[in-house]
Amino acid sequence: MSSNAVFAKASPLDALQRWLPKLVLAPSMVIVLVGFYGYIGWTFLLSFTNSRFMPSYNFVGLQQYARLWDNDRWWVASQNLLVFGGLFIAISLVIGVFLAVLLDQRIRREGFIRTIFLYPMALSMIVTGTAWKWLLNPGLGLDKLLRDWGWEGFRFDWLVDPDRVVYCLVMAAVWQSSGFVMALFLAGLRSVDQSIIRAAQVDGASLPSIYLRIVLPSLGPVFFSALMILAHIAIKSFDLVASMTAGGPGYASDLPAMFMYAHTFTRGQMGLGAASAMLMLGAVLAILVPYLYSELRGKRHD
């Protein structure tokens, strides 16, 4: 019997079952292609134009990228990203690993304690930034509280200090994300073969040595995943800065995402904002591409 005869005898219900997954996925695919990749391409196009308050298609080549290169505020934002991203990633990893190791000891009320550490991750960055803005405000928060309690010489005015305000962003971001890192590593620790740990204990190895020399080195993929996620969060950080410092004092706490928003939507320099957005996309791809490559290569070897 020919294939045409087989399809001819197929019922409408069989045809519907065959096409239903494609029909269900089609709207999502269209939205992703147009609303995500389409707008990336449009932003890339605008970065080569002299667009201001409205899109313009008067192409000026690499002029916007040259302006970005000469823009002092962009360099401040980029330097802040290096400081913020480096400290945020390093401190979040250290605290997250430390908390995961502690919880891996099967302590009492582990579920309750884990929930407390994970709770900040349930909050949006807007809420986190607003709460830490109140907490670190010299006239309202911790500074005023301790001085009212009698510590007249206490000063913690980093939020209004141009040289230290970026460290306030680090504290807020670490507070929110370290619990997530803890959850990642706790899941990895629970997957380690316990017979290896027991064998090391029989050989006389101490618990810190077991974790430092055996357990944690075996969690390389977890380290890499946590690093990629935290770096991605750092590069895209906008809402935390907007709610906590608005880029101030002046533009001392600007990050590239804040720079892009300010120039695109409030300063009427859409072409310059699009160029900064493309450089941010390049930074994200520089992180994601090695991660995806390692994942795909690992699957091929499996």
Image (cartoon, helix red, strand yellow):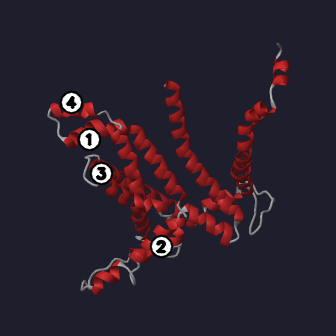
Q: Is 3 on the left or on the right of 262, as rendered? A: right
Q: Residue 234: give its label.
A: none
The local crowd at label 4, few if under 14, some if 14 to 19, many if 20 or more residues have their Cα within 10 Å, is few
Q: Residue at x 55, y 64 (%)?
A: 238
Residue type beneath disc 4: Ala
Q: Nearer the viewer, mark 1 or mark 4?
A: 4
Mark 1, secondary structure of its residue: helix
Q: Is 218 on the left or on the right of 233, as rendered? A: left
> Can residue 159 be seen from the camera position used here?
yes
* In-front residue for pair 198/78: 198
Q: Nearer the viewer, mark 2 or mark 4?
A: 4
Q: Earlier in the sequence, mark 4 or mark 3?
A: 3
Q: Earlier in the sequence, mark 1 or mark 2?
A: 2
Q: Quadrant of residue 15?
A: top right
The local crowd at label 1, few if under 14, some if 14 to 19, many if 20 or more residues have their Cα within 10 Å, is some
Q: Residue 130: give its label.
A: 2
Residue receiving disc 1: 211
Residue type beneath disc 2: Thr
Residue receiving disc 3: 98
- Contact, mark 3 vs mark 2 (Cβ under 8 Å): no
The Cα atoms of the two marked residues, 3 and 2, are separated by 27 Å
The Cα atoms of the two marked residues, 1 and 4, are separated by 13 Å
On screen, residue 249 above or below 171: below
